[in-house]
Image: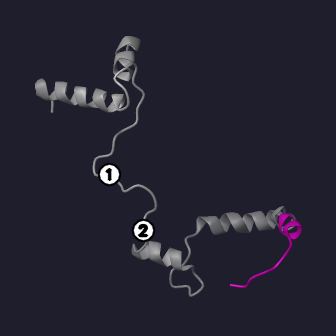
Amino acid sequence: MAMIKMTLDQAMTELKKPESRKMIRSGMRRTPDVSDPDAPDLIKLLKIGGARRIGRPVKENPKKALNLRLDADIVAAFQNTGPGWQTRINDGLRQMLKMIGCL
């Protein structure tokens, strides 16, 4: 793969050309060939599963974000218990579902 040096103004002018945009769009749709000696090492690692994921580890049973409408006094009572109030709502719901045999 050849490296072309140009100024920022030259690059911006080049990017405005319709043929350049078409070439960029087509390149975004194709996956780089791992057998290509010019392919970046990162792509090779991702293809063979050797790359580490950045960020928090994936949980086995992740929580699900949702919108839930509760009475204001219920929310206020849990919020008044301090940090972790949402976890306590989850724990209370779990305990109630176990008591009635749904879990």
The amino acid sitting under disc 2 is Arg
Q: Residue at x 73, y 85 (%)?
A: 2
Q: Residues within 10 Å of mark 1 (few under 14, many from 20)?
A: few
Give the image location of residue 58, x and y in percent.
Answer: 35, 55
Element at badge 2?
A: loop
Element at badge 1?
A: loop
In the image: residue 6, left or right of residue 85? right
Q: Would you place residue 21 above or below residue 45 in this image?
A: above
Q: Which residue is mark 2?
A: 52
Corner quadrant of residue 25: bottom right
The amino acid sitting under disc 1 is Lys
Q: Residues within 10 Å of mark 2 (few under 14, many from 20)?
A: few
Per the rendered image, the range of residues in magenta is: 1-12
Query: Can you see residue 70?
Result: no
Question: Is residue 58 one of those drawn in magenta?
Answer: no
- Total label count? 2
Q: Which residue is mark 1?
A: 59
Residues at discs 2 and 1 in contact (Cβ within 8 Å): no
Tell which circle, 2 or 1, labels the residue nearer the N-terminal end: 2
Q: Would you place residue 96 above or below residue 3 in this image?
A: above
Q: Quadrant of the C terminus?
A: top left
Corner quadrant of residue 63: top left
Corner quadrant of residue 22: bottom right
Q: Residue at x 58, y 69 (%)?
A: 30
Tell me how the rendering is colored. one colour
In the image: residue 15, left or right of residue 80? right
Q: Residue at x 37, y 26 (%)?
A: 82
